[in-house]
Amino acid sequence: MILLDRVSKTYNKALGPSLDRISLHVEPKEFVIVVGQSGAGKTTLLRLLTREERPTSGKIIIGGIDYDKLRDKDIPLLRRKIGVVFQDFKLLPNKNVYENVAFALEIVGVPNREIKHTVPKVLDIVNLKGKEKRMPQELSGGERQRVAIARAIVRQPRILIADEPTGNLDPKHAWDVIKVLEKINRYGTTVLLTTHNVEIVNKLKRRVVTLQHGKVASDRANADYKI
Amino acid sequence: MKRKFITFGRIIHTGAVNFLRNVSLGVAAIAVMVVTLTIILFSVIANATFAHTIQQITDKIDISVYLNDSDTAAQSKQLVSSLKQLPNVKSIQYLSKQDALQRYLAQNNGNDTLLSAVTQSPSNPIPATILIKPNDLNKINDIKDYLSKPDIKALQSNDPSYSGDRKKAIDNITGATNTLQRIGAVAVIVFTVICALIIFNTIQMAIFNRRDEITIMRLLGARTSYIRGPFVVESIIYGILSAVLSILIINSAFIASSNALQASSLGLLDISYASQWFGNNFLKLLTMQLTAGILIGTVSSVIATRRYLKFKVR
Ligand SMILES: Nc1ncnc2c1ncn2[C@@H]1O[C@H](COP(=O)(O)OP(=O)(O)OP(=O)(O)O)[C@@H](O)[C@H]1O
Ligand SMILES: [Mg+2]
């Protein structure tokens, strides 16, 4: 599903590489946790997958799409296949909860009828029923997080990338979010999750990839948190 | 296919909504566009009116060729048909001595001295006459040259007469038309450029105001055309509004001038004809204005969005 072969990314030559010859292979339907200290390169790795950034060197293939052969005009199609929960949410401040989620469907030409049908179901999954009309600034951090998740999964992507989706949540809400991700994963979506949260990692017992200074320090199945 | 229609509808909807939200931003763009389109419209109307005036004067002009009383019928017939061959000759009318006399009497009706001089004379003093109407007054020399050939000249009792006093009026109008065309062309170009620049600026500002939204749309997989579309739609709305406004301005100018001015013309411009022509060609002119407005809006917004919405992966 996801294949990285000796991928490096250097933003600024003076600062050295943010990712240094990363190789990673993720099977379809796998649930992979990426951990690492702040600045280890987790977000950079995810940005390469969504083609927000180009690797300085190395090969990336996702769902059969070879990024070397990807033209700029085909990037939208790639991004439609990947759902992303951004570390900073990236919600539209002038749209309410419902509209923020519907937006992801509108821009790809989904008919209104289908939008009206799908969005409430997804908002139900993330426990935001009854908050459809709220604006993002009227939501708690955890609620915003869940809107971001709803938007990422509403198109039923084959791959879901979640960048610290539990970042500013209390343990209970953090765990609610993780349960949603597990549910999505059970339905067959490949999940890539980055987190600092030791408890979550230990409780999940999934494959854990540890990044350190832009390198893969370890890659273990059914693993605990370890840096 | 269906999704394309839905997407198209959403682009238009978003463009219209954004237009309403940014009206204050769009006012400047609409204002210059109205000026530009009004200049275009005025030039077109003035052009048509001048052409009409020239045509009208040209129609009244003819060349009279006076024959000898001694010319035979065959000779006159021969001359008429040879004149018909000249490319610049529009029509020819042959007046016998009797017809020419009638015409002379009619033309000088009221001028008793002239009339009595003619009627008192024992025989008809007016020669048989050939009246020539030219196609193009500026090429009248072709006909002149032909008439002054010795063998043709021999058939004539007098030099041909040209209703040449009108030539000056025609030169004036032709000059005015040319000047107007030149001024109009320069003004249209200048204002179109200003218009494009202001649309550029408006779009740049709108893009800046919505940069977060645009980034998010990109990240969620929106195509560039979907992001750009609403900006183009917005500019097309400017174009349509400006086209309608320019028509209204010219229309009310005609109404105002017909109320205020007693005279039916302003300088060389025949306002009553211009107003009538405007009315008769209203739909065509409206279409022209809409086309021009939509074209200016589309082209400048496509260029502007190309420039500011460039999609580059680092
Ligand atoms: N756009 C950029 N330009 C220059 N350097 C960057 C850029 N983005 C990230 N970096 C650098 O790359 C390194 C990795 O950053 P990254 O955001 O991937 O870390 P992270 O593992 O996601 O950290 P965190 O846990 O704090 O989110 C950091 O040293 C960061 O300063
Ligand atoms: Mg990060």
Image (cartoon, helix red, strand yellow):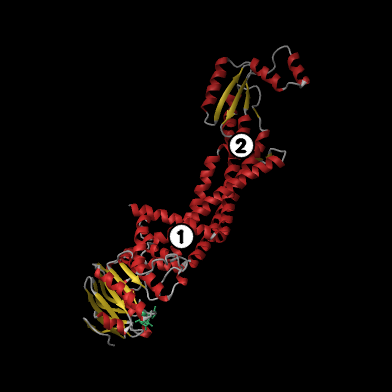
* Badge 2 density bin: few <14, some 14–19, many ≥20, Cα 10 Å: few
Instruction: Give the Cα distance between marks 1 and 2.
Output: 39 Å
Say which residue label 2 marks: B276
Task: Report the front residue among B257 and A80.
Answer: A80
Relative to the observer, which residue lies in front, B45 or B236? B236
Can residue B250 be seen by looking at this rendering? yes
Residue B262: x, y in percent? 72, 38
Residue type at numbered disc 2: Gln
| B229 in relation to A94, above or below | above
Q: Mark 2 lies on which chain?
A: B
A116 w.r.t. B272: above or below: below
Q: Which residue: 30% across, 74% down?
A: A179
Secondary structure under tag 2 reads helix
Residue A114 location, quadrant: bottom left
Q: Is residue A6 left or right of residue A18?
A: left
Disc 1: which residue: B303
Q: What element carries label 1?
A: helix
Q: What residue type is labelled 1?
A: Ile
Q: Which quadrant of the rendered structure holds the C terminus of chain B?
A: bottom left
Callout 1: residue from which chain? B
Where residue B264 appears, as percent x and y from the top left, is: 69, 37
Q: Residues within 10 Å of mark 1 (few under 14, many from 20)?
A: some
Q: Can residue B196 be seen in the rendering of this structure?
A: no
Q: In this view, does A103 lie above or below B121?
A: below
Q: Nearer the viewer, residue A210 or B52?
A: A210
